[in-house]
Image (cartoon, rainbow, N blue to C red):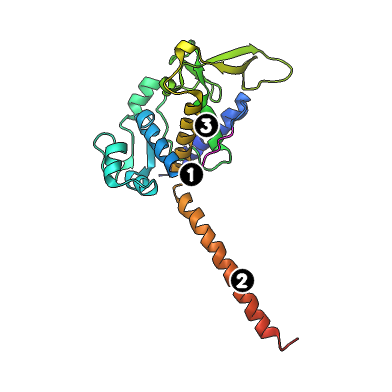
Amino acid sequence: MLKSRLFAVLLACVPALAAAAGKVEMLDAPIDVHDRASLQRGAGLYMNYCAACHSLQFMRYSRLGEDLGLSVEQVEQLIIKGNAKIGDTMITGMSKEDGTAWFSKAPPDLSTTVRGKKGQEDWVYTFLRSFYVDESRPMGWNNTVLSGASMPNVLWELQGIQRATIEPMGEDGCPVAQVGGNCITGFVIQEHERGRMTPAEFDRAILDLTAFLTYVAEPARLQREALGVWVILFLSFFTLLAWLMKREYWKDVH
C-alpha cells in the first residue's frame, strides 16, 4: 500500500516536472466533469485505446456505471473487456514484465494522473494532442510535453500522422515547445495522412478523454460539489436562525 501511494505521488509530480523542463506552452482544457455524455464518450475512448496498457486500479466498473448513468448490462456490454466482473477494479491484462519488455518501462496506472495539482488536466490534454513523428525514436513517435516518452501515439488513426514544424530558436521564444536548441512552431498533417476524425472532432474526443481521467482521479467530486450547494443553504438558514435568536435574547438588554 505504501509503495502504491508513493508511486502515485511520484506519478503526479512527473507531468509538472516534465512541463517545466521542456518549456511547453500548455493548452487550456475546458472540461466539464458534470457532463455525463462527455464522460461516457471518454470512457469509451479509454477502454478502446488505453485500457490494454493502463489500469485504473482505484476505480470499479460498478462505480463507473453508477456515476455515468449506465446500467449493469451497458457496462458489461460496452465497457468491460475480457473476463472481468462488474465488481472488479479496472486492471489491465498486461503484466509489468510484458510492459517493460515491450516499452522499456511498464505503463503506469492512470487513476491519479489528474489529481493533486492544479492544471494537471491541461497537461493531459496537451500531452494527448502533442505526439509527432520522430523516426529516431524506437516507437517512431515523440511528444513535446514529455520528450522521449516510451508511449506510442495510440490515437494516430483518429488524429492522423502529425509532423512537427521545427525551426531554429529565435528571440521571441517558441509558440509550442523547445526541443534542444530548436523550436517546434506547430504541427502539420498532410492530406494523405489525415485520420478518421476532423481536427475539431479529435479535439472534442481528447477533451472527453481528459474529462474522464479527471473524473476517475476523484469520483467523489461529483457528489461533493452537489452536496456543497445544500451545505451552503443549510449554513445560510442556520445563520439566519442564529441571528433571530440573538436579536430575541438581546432585545431587553438594549
Which amino acid type is marked by label 3?
Answer: Tyr
Where is residue 79 shown, x and y percent of the image? 32, 38
Circle 2 SS class: helix
On residue 125, the disc is 3
Q: Residue at x 61, y 17 (%)?
A: 184
Circle 1 SS class: loop
Q: Quadrant of residue 59?
A: top left
Residue holding disc 1: 33
**Compared with residue 51, is residue 86 higher up or lower down, i.e. above or below?**
below
The mark that comes first in sequence, 3 or 1, is: 1
Tell me: 159 left or right of 88. right
Residue holding disc 2: 239
On residue 156, the disc is none
Where is residue 156 shown, x and y percent of the image? 43, 20
Circle 3 SS class: helix
Is the C terminus in the top left, top right, bottom left or bottom right quadrant? bottom right
Whole-Å distance between the Cαs marked 1 and 2?
31 Å
The mark that comes first in sequence, 3 or 2, is: 3
Q: Residue at x 32, y 29 (%)?
A: 94
Magenta stretch, residue numbers? 28-32
Q: Residue at x 58, y 33 (%)?
A: 16
Which amino acid type is marked by label 2?
Answer: Thr
